[in-house]
Structure formats: C-alpha cells, structure tokens
Image (cartoon, rainbow, N blue to C red):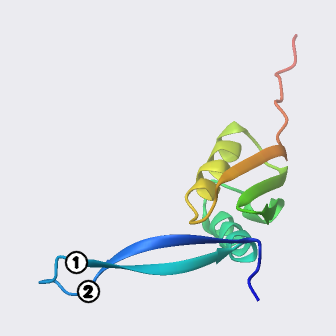
Amino acid sequence: MKNNNEEKTSIPVKKTQSDNEAIVVESVVSDSWITDKVKSSLVYTKQVPGLSIKVSTHDGVVTLSGRVDNQAEHTSAIKTAKNIKGVKSIITKDLIFEIVKAPVH
C-alpha cells in the first residue's frame, strides 16, 4: 500500500564510466524521513539550538517551532532544513526569538 505522504524523486545514476547512458533510480522520501533528517541536522548544526526546535512535516512542507536566541539562529535553522532532500517549503511562524533592546538611560 502506498503512503500518500511520500514524494518520489528521480536520481540519474551512471551505469559505468564508459557508458554514457543514465538509468533512473526512484527514491521515496516520506514525511517521517524528512522530519528525522531535519531534526538530526539541526542537532548537529553548531549555529542552531537543535534540541529547542520542534519539527513536523506534511506533504514535504516542514514546520519549525520553538525558541531560538537570535536572527542568526533563526536563519541558520531555515537554511539547514532547506538543504534536506524532499523539503518543498518551510513554515516558521512558530519559530520565535525575542529582540532584546538595550535599556534607555
């Protein structure tokens, strides 16, 4: 039975070095695989508090939620998620950080 939340991608693969023809290998990327890959990538990215970010995926659309410390972490989390195979788009409306303004004296 086929899962409706799977995306098929085609990857050209060379048969041999001397053969100029390419064969197509079908690969199935499920939402759960994308979620796991995004989570693990966030944890191993030094510029992101990966354990503070929740990840969910539906039809290749990744939602990031939680709290980061600054804009740089926010941007890095998005960039990390975008680099995962099968990610179609990213929703970050619930990935927040507070801009702390210096007190006025």
The location of residue 25, given as percent across then percent down, is 44, 81
Choose between 52 and 56: the one closer to the eye: 56
Q: Quadrant of the N terminus?
A: bottom right
How much space separates mark 1 and mark 2, taking CA atoms?
Answer: 7 Å
Tell which residue pokes out farthest to the left in this image.
18
- The image shows residue 10, relative to residue 19, as above or below, that is above
Tell which tag, 1 or 2, sits nearer the viewer.
Answer: 1
Mark 2 = which residue? 15
Q: Secondary structure at mark 2?
A: loop
Q: Position of 44 compared to 61: left or right?
A: left
The location of residue 50, given as percent across then percent down, is 73, 62
Q: Amino acid at mark 2?
A: Lys
Choose between 86 and 65: the one closer to the eye: 86
Q: Amino acid at mark 1?
A: Glu
Q: Are marks 1 and 2 in contact (CB under 8 Å)?
A: yes
Q: Position of 93 compared to 89: left or right?
A: right
Mark 1 = which residue? 21
User: Which class describes the residues within 10 Å of circle 1: few (<14), some (14-19), or many (20+)?
Assistant: few
